[in-house]
Amino acid sequence: MSSRQITVNRRALRDYHVLERVEAGIELRGTEVKSIRLGHVSMIGAYARVEKGEAWLLGLNISPYDHGNQFNHDPERPRRLLLHKQEIHKLQAQAEQKGLALVPLAMNFRRGRVKVEIGVCRGKQAHDKRETIKRRTADREAARAMRQR
């Protein structure tokens, strides 16, 4: 299965504990896909929401296509996520729990289609972030020591 990564929301991985991951399709216009292929996409501040039985991705910024015409897209428009009804109901139930959020984690091309990885996340506190940094540093030092041997 061919897959090419477009972007990763590193801030989300830093600020949240990811409890579950779901891959969803996304409804896009032609100029949006061309702009994404050029890498003009930002996930900072993006989030997902379930409204009226549909999943929406809000706050995702896809810059207008340079060679687009008068029908170029709005960079901040809400974009519908393409999921099965059961997956939408499951995400809605999880999002309604206190302290959980639906956050986009990554975007990639899979067989020529744009896919978004949505995470059901719980916010980290400052001491959790410090613990993550310590663990990452320890793992890096252990890997470095193993390579030197």
Image (cartoon, grey):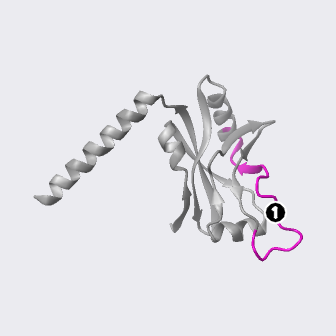
Front-most of 136 and 105? 136
- Position of residue 71 in the picture relative to residue 38 (left or right): right
Residue 140: % across, % down:
27, 50
| Residue positioned most to the top | 98
Is 90 included in the stretch rendered in magenta? no
Residue extending furthest toward the left: 149
Q: Look at the numbered disc 1 and give the secondary structure of its residue.
A: loop
Q: Disc count in the image? A: 1
| Relative image position of residue 4 (x, y in whole percent) | 53, 66
- Quadrant for the C terminus in the image: bottom left
Q: Residue at x 22, y 49 (%)?
A: 141
Q: Vertically, is 58 above or below 64?
A: above
Displayed quadrant of residue 134:
top left
For the stretch drawn in magenta, the main secondary structure is loop
Asked if residue 26 lies left or right of residue 99, the reply is right
Q: Which residues are magenta?
A: 65-86
The residue that appears at 37% across and 37% down in the rendered structure is: 132
Residue shown at 36%/40% (left/top)? Answer: 133
Local crowd size for mark 1, using a 10 Å CA cut-off: few (<14), some (14–19), many (≥20): some
Q: Position of residue 92 (x, y in %)?
A: 68, 33
Q: Name the residue carrying label 1.
A: 73
Q: Is residue 99 above or below residue 148?
A: above
Front in this rendered view, residue 58 or 50: 58
Determine which quarter of the picture holds residue 28: bottom right
Mark 1 is on which residue type?
A: His
95 or 73: nearer the eye? 73
Where is residue 116? Give x, y as percent.
61, 53
> What residue is shown at x 52% (from left), y 65% (from top)?
3
